[in-house]
Image: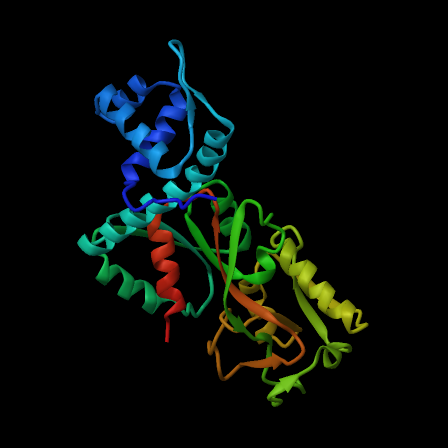
Amino acid sequence: MRDININNIQIQDLELFLTAAKYGSFTKAGEMMFLSQSWVSKRISFMERELGLQLFVRNNRKLTLTPAGRILALRLEAVTDHILDALQEAHSAQKGAAGYLRLGFLDWNANPYMKVLERFMEQNPRILVDVLFQQFSELKKNFMEGRTDMIFTVSYDVEDLPDTEYHVEALERIPLIAYMNRKNHLADRAQIRVEDLRPESMLMLDPNSCRGYTKYINGLFSSHHVSPLVYQYANSGREHLGNILLNRGILLASRNFLADTYPEDVAAVEVSDAVLYLTATWKKENCNPAVRMFLEACKERE
C-alpha cells in the first residue's frame, strides 16, 4: 500500500469534495463556497493525487463518485462536522459564548446547581438563561415539547426515554429519604431499610403524575418482598406535607425534595438499600453549545 500524504490537504479541500459530491458539479460547489470552478477542479485534482485515490468519474453531464469516493464522502461528513463544531466552540470560548439556554429543574426545596448556574451566568454574560422550576409531569412535558434544552431531575423520571434520541447523564448519587413526622418510631434512626417500612402507612404519588416514580417505588418494595400499605395518593410530594405534619404516613423522595425544611416537625431518614441519581437530560439532536458548556460546569461543581 502506498504512503498516504495528508499534510498538504486543507479543511477547505474536504468541504469542497463533499460539496461537489453533494451537487455532482464543480461549478455548483464553487458557487456554494464562493470559489471559481477552475479552483475547485484544481484542488480536487490535487487532493486525488495526494491521497492516491480517484474520487470522481468526470463526464460532460455530471460528476459521479467512484466507489472510493462514496466511502470517503460517507466517512468525512461526520468528521468535518466535528471539526467545524470544535472550531466554532473554541472561537466561542475565546470571545465569550453567546446564545440562549433554557433549563428545567425539578421543583425541589434544595437545588444543588443554583450556585453553579449563578457562576455560569457571571462567566457567560452573553448567554441568556431561562429557568423553569416544575413538578414531574410539567417538567417532562415541556422538555418533550422542546420548551427546554436540558432538564435536571431524578433518575427514575427519565428511565423510559429512548437512548437513541436522548442523552441521560448521571451527575451524582443522591440518597432516597423517608420523610416522616418526628413522632414516628423510626424518626430517631440514622438509616432504615425497605423492610422497616413493611408495617408503615405510606404516602404515594399518583401514577399519572410521575410513572417513573411509581415504577421505581413499586419495584423497590417488590424486590424486598414488601407490600406497601398506602394511606393516600397525591399529585406531588408537596401535597403530602400536611399528612406528614399530622403523622399520617411516610413519603419516600430524594434528599433534595425537602432538605432541612421543617426540621422540628419532619425527620429525614435515609433508606440504606436504595439507589438514586440526579441526572441531566437533553435531546441528541440539540446542537446548542451552551448545553454542553453548562453540563461541564455542573460536573466541575465542588
Residue 78, image x, y percentages: 43, 41
Q: Is residue 37 above or below residue 127?
A: above
In the visual, does 272 lie left or right of 137?
Answer: right
Nearest to the observer: residue 267 or residue 289: 289
The image quadrant of residue 235 is: bottom right
The image quadrant of residue 205 is: bottom right
Q: Is residue 113 above or below residue 82?
A: below
In the visual, does 184 lie left or right of 221?
Answer: left
Residue 157, image x, y percentages: 58, 57
In the visual, does 254 lie left or right of 63?
Answer: right
Nearest to the observer: residue 90 or residue 9: 9
Residue extending farthest front: 2
Nearest to the observer: residue 51 or residue 131: 51
The residue drawn where x is 49% and y is 40% is 145
Does the rendering let one see residue 200?
A: yes
Residue 293, image x, y percentages: 34, 57
